[in-house]
Amino acid sequence: MYRYPYVTGTSVIGIKYKDGILMAADMGGSYGSTLRYKSVERMKPIGKHSLLGASGEISDFQELLRYLDELILYDNMWDDGNSLGPKEVHSYLTRVMYNRRNKFNPLWNSLVLGGVKKGQKFLGTVVSMIGVHFEDNHVATGFGNHLARPILRDEWHENLSFEDGVKLLEKCMLVLLYRDRSAINKLQIAKITEEGVTISPPYSLKTFWGFSAFKNPTVGAEGSW
């Protein structure tokens, strides 16, 4: 039996900044190529120290959140004064994704996991549904990996302020809005610091569609298109 995603979300972008981690994602949920849902939250706090963002199948993301709720509850039951940090949660997610891949029933997601614990910032991604993963100063999933990462390589630096980090993420999200058919102009930006997680209310970016390349995109094209 073949399994394919039904309702999917597009890119998630995460960066380190001076005080912690910033993450951005839009709120679109695509049913095939139809933008069916426009209020899907794809970033969630995990425990005390972590923030998770997901691309891909929304119901699989919800299944992962159920797994993580059980993990955090079990950890809290020990009542030993310790709590799972982002490195542990990231490691757990890589094992879950790889385990489901080996059962030929993968969770159809790409994930971004960021957090801060004891002053240590962590940002990692589970790139694919087969458990491929890495850590970096800035990560992105979906189209963001192709269109946003070049911008981040040019403009990211270690001492980004919160305001500059938000501007950088908004610049990346604007490029994705112009170039990714699954992106919508309704996004959230989340931050996680030692104080905890804050997720912004949804908002839109100012756009400009008067670029000459947008007015007649088929100029100079050859063939039946």
Image: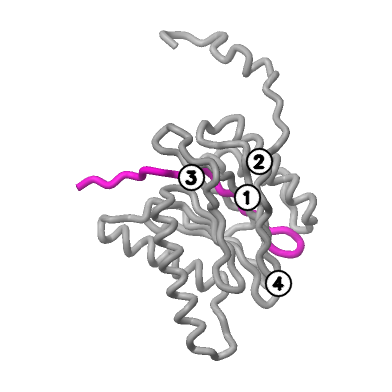
As rendered, which of 24 and 77 lies closer to the eye? 77
Q: Which one is in front, 169 or 32?
A: 32
Disc 1 marks which residue?
Answer: 24
Q: Secondary structure at mark 1?
A: strand
Residue 146, above or below 127: above
SS assignment at label 3: strand
Circle 4 is placed at which residue position? 194
At a point 51% along the width and 73% down the height, the residue shown is 88
Q: Amino acid at mark 1?
A: Ala
Query: Which of the two discs, 3 and 4, labels the residue nearer the N terminus?
Result: 3
Q: Are marks 2 and 1 in contact (CB under 8 Å)?
A: yes
Q: Label 4: few (<14), some or many (≥20) within 10 Å?
A: some
> Looking at the picture, does residue 130 appear above or below residue 117?
above
Q: Which residue is mark 3?
A: 9
User: What amino acid is at disc 4?
Assistant: Glu
Among the two numbered marks 1 and 4 on one chain, the one whose residue lies closer to the N terminus: 1
> Is 189 placed left or right of 163 in the picture?
left
Q: How is the image coloured?
A: one colour
Q: Is residue 88 above or below residue 82?
A: above
Reply yes or no: does residue 15 show up in magenta. yes
Q: Earlier in the sequence, mark 3 or mark 2?
A: 3
The residue tagged 2 is 172
The residue shown at (54%, 56%) is 53
Q: Amino acid at mark 2?
A: Cys
Which of the marked residues, 2 or 1, is nearer the chain's N terminus?
1
Q: Name the spot of residue 163 as percent of width and height, x first.
A: 79, 52
Compare marks 4 and 2 and give the one earlier in the sequence: 2
Q: Are marks 1 and 4 in contact (CB under 8 Å)?
A: no
Please indicate, yes or no, whether residue 101 appears anywhere in the rendered image.
yes
Q: Nearer the viewer, mark 3 or mark 4?
A: 3
- Per the model, the C-alpha gap separating discs 3 and 4 is 28 Å
User: Gap between marks 3 and 2, in whole Å?
Assistant: 16 Å
